[in-house]
Image: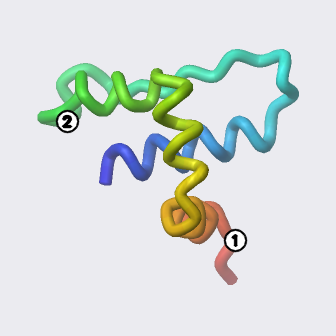
Amino acid sequence: MATLIGLSIKVKLLRSLPERFKIDVHITPGAHASEQAVNKQLGDKERVAAALENSHLLEVVNQCLSART
């Protein structure tokens, strides 16, 4: 779940901020058992791009970001 949450945060920021901003999403040190692996995934542009090309995963991210009433 940490990777999905981090990816959702990164996508929200990418969609909300102008392209001139550099976005880095990291897990707080000591907050997760797989902190280094998750940070490596979130920091790798190719991995993030590949994840967002996956239609099912993109649908899940969009559901995470959708406003619920």
Amino acid marked by disc 1 = Ala
Residue 11 on image: x %, y %: 64, 44
- Labelled disc at residue 32: 2
Q: Position of residue 59 (x, y in %)?
A: 58, 68
User: Where 42 falls versus 3 (above or below)?
Assistant: above
Compared to 30, does 64 lie above or below? below
How far apart in space, not on screen, are marks 1 and 2 (Cα)?
27 Å
Which residue is found at the position 67% from the left and 46% from the top?
A: 12
The C terminus, quarter of image: bottom right
User: Residue 17's x, y, as percent?
Assistant: 81, 32
Secondary structure found at label 1? loop
Q: What kind of colouring is applied to the model shown? A: rainbow
Q: Which residue is mark 1?
A: 67
Q: Is residue 33 left or right of residue 50?
A: left
Residue 64 image point, x, y percent: 55, 64
* Image-based side of 63 in relation to 13, left or right: left
Q: Residue at left 32%, top 46%?
A: 2
Q: Which mark is residue 9?
A: none
Residue found at the very far bottom of the displayed protein: 69
Q: Is residue 56 above or below residue 44?
A: below
Identify the amino acid type marked 2.
Answer: His
Q: Which of the pair 47/69 is nearer the observer?
A: 47
